[in-house]
Image: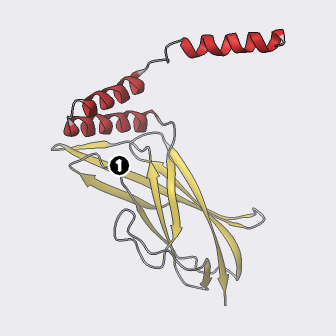
Amino acid sequence: MTPAYVLLTIACLTCASLPAAAGPLTDKAAEVESLLSAGDDLGAIAAARALFGSAWDATTGLSIGETVLLAEPASGYGIYNPRPSDTYKLGEPVLIYAEPMGFGYGSPGDGLYSIGFFVDLKVMTEMGELLADLQNVTELDLTSRYPNREFQTNLTYNLDGITPGRYILQTTLRDKNSAKIGSFENTVEFVE
């Protein structure tokens, strides 16, 4: 063995013997494991939800889990029919489904939670030329008795006056209950 290999082996063995760095998320995960081992399924699920909530709250921005061009408006979270292509006739509305994650919650009172977003839209050519930069195109809101993590958008864009061609639609969601922002893009083509 070469001396460098021996030193590397000793360093790896030393690191492997050190305890893992603990923190609130690690502690909560250990609690989930402990509750499962004890047969406390309900307690384990509650602790896992709390762990998920802690990770959710620690995010620095909005993440967008899924974005899909739709054949018709979604009827619920994950309940949608994708459009078979990204081609639209001029004047046809563009329906988009998206799943934002990491958003904050408002407190409208009576034990309720509110979720809300301001929606901005940029329309660009495929080459990146900005054709429209529209702020506050619409707002999305939900009030619930539970801090829902599953929230879907049903966006409808009517791009009247657009000419045939391929375009990038960049949607930005601005959280009403935190400083978090997230964006996603969909490419569409308009034909005569």
Q: Quadrant of residue 188?
A: bottom right
160 up-or-down from 146: above or below: below
| Image quarter hosting the C terminus | bottom right
Q: Quadrant of residue 122?
A: bottom right
The residue pinned by badge 1 equals 149
Q: Residue furthest left?
A: 110
x and y percentages locating residue 119 in the rendered image: 49, 58
| Image quarter hosting the N terminus | top right
Residue at the spot x=26%, y=36% of the render?
Answer: 44
Residue at the spot x=49%, y=18% of the render?
Answer: 20
Colour approach in the figure: secondary structure
x and y percentages locating residue 27 in the rendered image: 37, 23
Mark 1 lies on a secondary structure that is loop
Viewer-closest of 136 and 128: 128
51 up-or-down from 160: above or below: above
x and y percentages locating residue 189 in the rendered image: 66, 78
Q: Quadrant of residue 102?
A: top left
x and y percentages locating residue 74 in the rendered image: 39, 71
Viewer-closest of 93 and 137: 93
Viewer-closest of 83 and 21: 21
Q: Is residue 9 left or right of residue 157?
A: right
Q: Amino acid at mark 1?
A: Arg
Residue at the spot x=53%, y=49% of the render?
Answer: 182
